Amino acid sequence: MHSLAITPIPAFVDNYIWALHDQRVAVVVDPGDAKPVQAFLEQHNLALAGILVTHHHWDHINGILALTEEWPGIPVWGPARENIPGRTHALQQDDVITLPIGVRLNVLDLPGHTLGHIGYYCADYDGSGPLVLCGDTLFSSGCGRLFEGTPEQMHASLGLLARLPAETRICCTHEYTLSNLKFAAAVEPGNRAVTERIRQVEALRASAQPSLPSTLALERQVNPFLRTDEPAVIQAVTQNCGLSPAGSADTFAKLRSWKDRF
């Protein structure tokens, strides 16, 4: 296998288009804009060999047709239950695909942000352990808004991701980490891991470096949406809404509502 890399390509204000690549070809994830992808390919002398899509929002799909026009015949993998322009392969839970760079990905159904949202898990992408391309489901220190799905669906999707190996790299598609950490600090002001993560991310962003990928091990320490069984989180939610949540899913629902107003 050729040496593999994964690179976040900045797009718009805070999007990342992930590129999975070797020295010859690349597969990109959620190309909402073709131009930064084209510039990246040209800079690194790479051919585009495929496109992965997690969900149908415009900032994840609007560059697909321009890229498939420039690179005709490439595969476009996307969720079966959503309308994805140019899609050639419709995917759902437990499908397995092999990328042109020789990498196998397992498809995960992750409804919540949208009803048909999917993610892609690789058990060992580049010899450095597993990674998950989770779109707008799990963010670093946060999670996606519920535009179509229910709190119960998103809670279940996050639970599916939380059961992946601790060393899994979290490759989400927005640079929301600092704003998410502000909310995490409001929920758990005594969480030292959150305080340290804020310091770390502030330093990264001050030097124009991405805060991603995160790891699942870190997210379990700092992400309140993965900590809905923690007494401190339950207490904070109770104080915020005036009612004790009826279980973990209800804690998540109340926490997400709080974040929407934060």
Image: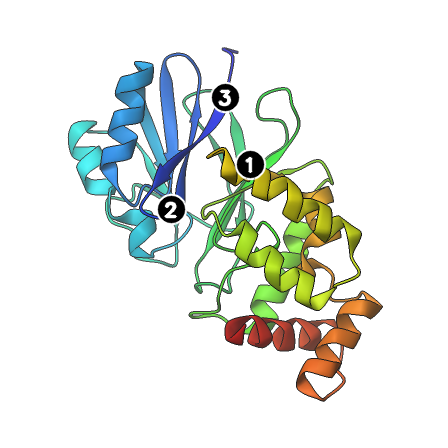
- Marks 2/3: CA distance? 22 Å
- Mark identifier at residue 214: none
Q: Is mark 3 on a helix, strand or loop?
A: strand
The picture quadrant where one finds residue 31 is top left
- Marks 2/1: CA distance? 32 Å
Question: Would you name the residue on which mark 2 appears?
Answer: 78
Could you tell which of marks 2 and 3 lies nearer the N-terminus?
A: 3
Q: Is mark 2 on a helix, strand or loop?
A: strand
Question: Would you name the residue on which mark 3 appears?
Answer: 5
Give the crowd class for mark 3: few <14, some 14-19, many >=20 residues within 10 Å: few
Question: Would you name the residue on which mark 1 appears?
Answer: 204
Comparing 52 with 253, the one in front is 253
Q: What residue type is labelled 1?
A: Leu
Relative image position of residue 189 (x, y in whole percent): 74, 63
Q: What residue type is labelled 2?
A: Gly
Viewer-nearest of discs 3 and 1: 1
Could you tell which of marks 2 and 1 lies nearer the N-terminus?
A: 2
